Image (spheres, coloured by chain):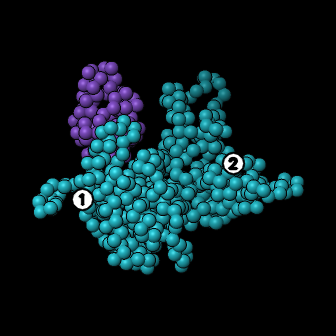
């Protein structure tokens, strides 16, 4: 038997709230299937399973806040013998909640609109409530005039209306202010720990982006709008490829042990509308073609902003890239996300005088920075890493 | 398509990337990025939304020169009239 536990979805996470099960006892599951949704201070996360088999038992009910590592379910792995029949297991003991299968994005929209998901029939697989179901319910609600408190819905002389039951208590904080406060606390905890435990050092390098931007403009000219590339994708790919040459930066701490990772999963710092940020990862960033990477990047940003991230995206990044985009400051020096050992920052791209072959020319440039863990590497190697990123960006067609 | 239909399509595409945007308070003659927290991904998704809503593909070189909602609407009006 294998145990499915409350995952650690970042260094700042010590506990999570089980929001819902997406599988039931007896269901067959394959590695990578999403089996539950967990609420953390930063996001609602769809949690994948890393074992194939059959769900044997669910041990907790939605609504329970549980420490990381708590066993949530038992899985009978593929090939394991079926256990002898036994008396039905006692039901999970935590406080029950209505069994509503709903995507995180839909849950947040329902909260914002004040709609009770239990009153909606989902159109997704297995009756799962999707964002569009909430939107439809909101439209229907808007079309039907809401009863006014001053105008009771019963006819004069009829029995007094029975008060509607109060809406079910939400499992987690729902007000935007509460969510933002929780997120700020989570960010503060992770960044404080990082600054306390990691001896940071910082390097910066200005990179000539002429070749990259010219190539990108030409490339996008021939592409339909749906397939356009952003220059951020070139930056991500250049970082991922440079990491192959500097594997010590593609590593995570496991307690006191440094684990170099073979897979390169670049985390992307994504700012959320209304404040806060998350840094989920793109798996195997170095192996993706630019088209694939752009698709993954766009999908990740979209899901991050609609609260639909997956657990492996939160737990697997091996380095983080933060980019200030088109209108930010010229430089950014990031704070390393534990247990990672480095973060790369890109400022906004600006045009600056640039000396090339003895001539001063206007040139699009971007400032790249590296914040690195001095327990793992030093200035010489870190400098060479930034030089590699620069070199790779000079040949964008090779990315 | 009428200008009003185009305006509606553009605003619909905008609401997908910036749900908090209130058309009644938006200034149509002011740089959108000064009014809303829009990054490069939002901008691309806005262009894709216009493509999906109005079947108009705005080349990147033109898109980079469109700053205000009025400019976007004028551009689409011209494109659809051509």
Which numbered tag is attached to residue A23?
A: 2
**Disc 2 residue crowd, few under 14, some 14–19, many 20+, Cα 10 Å:** some
Nearer to us in this view, A265 or A83: A265
Q: Residue at x 56, y 35 (%)?
A: A133
Which chain did the image draw in purple? B
Q: Residues within 10 Å of mark 1 (few under 14, many from 20)?
A: many
Q: Residue at x 63, y 31 (%)?
A: A161
The percent position of residue A204, horizontal first and vertical second, equals 29, 68
Disc 2/disc 1 C-alpha distance (Å): 51 Å
A317 above or below B1? below
Chain displayed in cyan: A
> Which corner quadrant of the image does residue A266 belong to?
bottom left
In the drawing, does residue A399 fall left or right of residue A75?
left
On screen, residue A156 versus residue B63, left or right, reads: right
Does any portion of residue A163 appear in the rendered image? no
| Chain of the residue under label 2 | A
Q: Is any part of residue A29 visible from this angle?
A: yes
A43 versus A196 height, above or below = above
For the N terminus of chain A, the quadrant is bottom right
């Amino acid at each position: 038997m294998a145990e499915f536990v409350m995952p650690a979805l970042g260094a700042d996470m010590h506990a999570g709230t089980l929001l819902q099960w997406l599988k039931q006892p007896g269901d067959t599951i394959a590695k990578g299937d999403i089996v539950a949704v967990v609420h953390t201070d930063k996001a609602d996360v769809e949690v994948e399973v890393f074992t194939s088999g059959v769900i044997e038992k669910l041990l907790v009910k939605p609504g329970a806040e549980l420490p990381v590592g708590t066993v949530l379910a038992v899985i009978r792995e593929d090939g394991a013998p079926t256990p002898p029949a036994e008396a039905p297991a006692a039901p999970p003991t935590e406080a029950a909640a209505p069994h509503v299968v709903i995507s995180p994005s839909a849950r947040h929209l329902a909260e914002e609109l004040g709609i009770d998901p239990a009153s909606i029939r989902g159109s997704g697989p297995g009756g799962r409530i999707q964002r569009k179901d909430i939107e439809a319910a909101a439209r229907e609600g808007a079309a039907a005039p809401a009863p006014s408190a001053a105008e009771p819905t019963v006819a004069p002389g009829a029995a007094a209306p029975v008060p509607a039951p109060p809406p079910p208590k939400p499992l987690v904080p729902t007000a935007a202010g509460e969510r933002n406060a929780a997120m700020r606390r989570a960010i503060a905890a992770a960044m404080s720990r990082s600054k306390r435990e990691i001896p940071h050092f910082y390097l910066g390098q200005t990179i000539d982006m002429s070749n990259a931007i010219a190539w990108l403009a030409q490339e996008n000219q021939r592409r339909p709008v749906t397939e356009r590339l952003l220059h951020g994708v070139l930056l991500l790919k250049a970082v991922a490829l440079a990491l192959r040459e500097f594997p010590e930066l593609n590593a995570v701490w496991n307690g006191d042990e440094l684990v170099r990772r073979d897979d390169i999963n670049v985390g992307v710092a994504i700012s959320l509308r209304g404040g806060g940020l998350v840094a989920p990862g793109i798996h195997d960033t170095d192996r993706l073609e630019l088209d694939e990477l752009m698709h993954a990047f766009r999908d990740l940003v979209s899901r991050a902003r609609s609260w639909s991230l997956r657990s492996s995206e939160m737990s697997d990044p091996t380095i983080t890239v933060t980019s200030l985009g088109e209108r930010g400051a010229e430089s950014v020096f990031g704070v390393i996300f534990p247990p990672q050992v480095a973060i790369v920052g890109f400022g906004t791209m600006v045009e600056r005088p640039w000396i090339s072959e003895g001539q001063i020319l206007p040139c699009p440039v971007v400032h790249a920075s590296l914040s690195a863990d001095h327990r793992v590497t030093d200035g010489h190697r870190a400098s060479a890493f930034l030089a590699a990123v620069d070199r790779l960006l000079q040949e964008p067609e090779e990315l | 398509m009428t200008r009003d239909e185009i305006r509606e399509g553009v605003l619909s595409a905008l609401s997908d990337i910036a749900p908090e945007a209130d058309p009644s308070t938006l200034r149509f003659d002011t740089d959108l990025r000064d009014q809303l927290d829009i990054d490069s991904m939002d901008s691309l998704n806005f262009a894709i939304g216009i493509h999906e809503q109005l079947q108009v593909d705005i080349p990147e070189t033109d898109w980079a020169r469109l700053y205000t909602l009025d400019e976007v609407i004028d551009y689409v009006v011209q494109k659809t009239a051509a």
